[in-house]
Image (cartoon, rainbow, N blue to C red):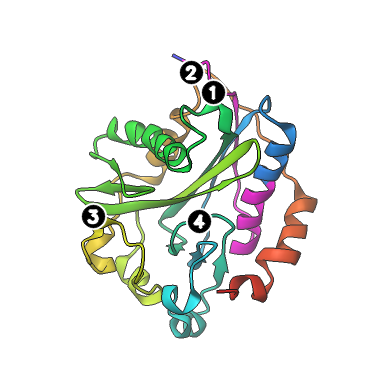
């Protein structure tokens, strides 16, 4: 049964070259959606980099969050997104998904935490239907057996919000430990002080099944969604003035 409060969604499965452009595209899509206002369509986006990259939250401290020596040695780019949350490793085996929708369409959406948990809850419901007992934990994680398999972050403008997440399905835990520091602050209670290898796990589903679950959480059966236009000029501007600027990445 379609949810009458939700807008229709457009779907974009697009990975641009490099982590900076992909972070810029998420923000550009949010900006364009906010300009259209509450009556505009929502957007579902999926992407996956062909090589590893580190993505910090907007306020993460690089010295704490990243092993810069290992990243430099291995040629792993380090970036900073405009949304909150912690630092993650993405790349092959980590499906990145983004939901952009009007805040007014979300029950209790005026509360930041409620909006994020509601978005993740819809995805968790679809993943549980495929077998794994996925649950929403902490302020924005999906977990399996008490271990994190997805982290998320949120960015809000006046009318619309972006919730994006990385879902691990085949990402080696040893790479996470190599490139990321253990966060000294704001650890979720359920982490219980565990290191990356003991805390993080992969979701035991193939990529295609995860992608279908993501889309099924928002699009009614039988609906063939359109693609949204790609705001190429805005993406290029955001890469030049923000994401590709070393001062933005190293600001904390």
Q: Residues within 10 Å of mark 1 (few under 14, many from 20)?
A: some
Q: Secondary structure at mark 1?
A: loop
* 178, 58: nearer the viewer: 58
**Picture disc at residue 190:** 3
Secondary structure type for disc 2:
loop
Q: Of label 1 and label 3, which has the lower sequence position?
A: 1
Q: Are marks 2 and 3 in contact (CB under 8 Å)?
A: no
The mark found on residue 6 in the picture is: 1
The residue wearing badge 2 is: 3
Q: Which residues are magenta?
A: 2-28
The N terminus - image quarter: top left
Which corner quadrant holds the C terminus? Answer: bottom right
At horizontal 24% and vertical 40% (from top left) the residue drawn is 132
Q: Residues within 10 Å of mark 4 (few under 14, many from 20)?
A: some
Mark 4 or mark 1: which is in front? 4
Q: How many numbered circles are shown?
A: 4
Q: Residue at x 54, y 23 (%)?
A: 6
User: Looking at the image, do the residues carrying marks 1 and 2 touch, with CB atoms under 8 Å apart?
Assistant: yes
């Amino acid at each position: 049964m379609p949810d009458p409060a939700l807008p229709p969604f457009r779907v974009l499965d697009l990975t641009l070259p490099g982590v900076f452009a992909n972070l810029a595209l998420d923000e550009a899509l949010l900006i364009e959606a906010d300009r259209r206002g509450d009556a505009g369509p929502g957007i579902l986006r999926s992407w996956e980099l062909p090589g590893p990259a580190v993505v910090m939250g907007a306020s993460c401290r690089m010295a704490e969050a990243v092993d810069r020596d290992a990243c430099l040695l291995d040629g792993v780019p380090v970036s900073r997104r405009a949304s909150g949350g912690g630092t993650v490793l993405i790349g092959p085996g980590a499906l990145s998904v983004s939901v952009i929708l009007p805040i007014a369409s979300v029950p209790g959406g005026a509360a930041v935490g409620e909006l994020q948990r509601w978005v993740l809850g819809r995805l968790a419901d679809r993943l549980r239907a495929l077998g794994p007992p996925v649950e929403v934990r902490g302020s924005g994680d999906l977990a399996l057996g008490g271990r994190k398999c997805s982290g998320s972050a949120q960015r809000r403008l006046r009318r619309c919000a972006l919730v994006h997440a990385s879902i691990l399905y085949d990402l080696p835990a040893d790479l996470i430990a190599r490139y990321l520091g253990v966060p000294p602050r704001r650890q979720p209670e359920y982490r219980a002080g565990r290191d990356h290898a003991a805390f993080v796990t992969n979701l035991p589903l193939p990529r295609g099944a995860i992608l279908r679950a993501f889309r099924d959480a928002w699009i009614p059966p039988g609906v063939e969604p359109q693609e949204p236009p790609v705001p190429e000029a805005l993406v290029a501007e955001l890469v030049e003035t923000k994401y590709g600027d070393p001062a933005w990445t190293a600001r904390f």
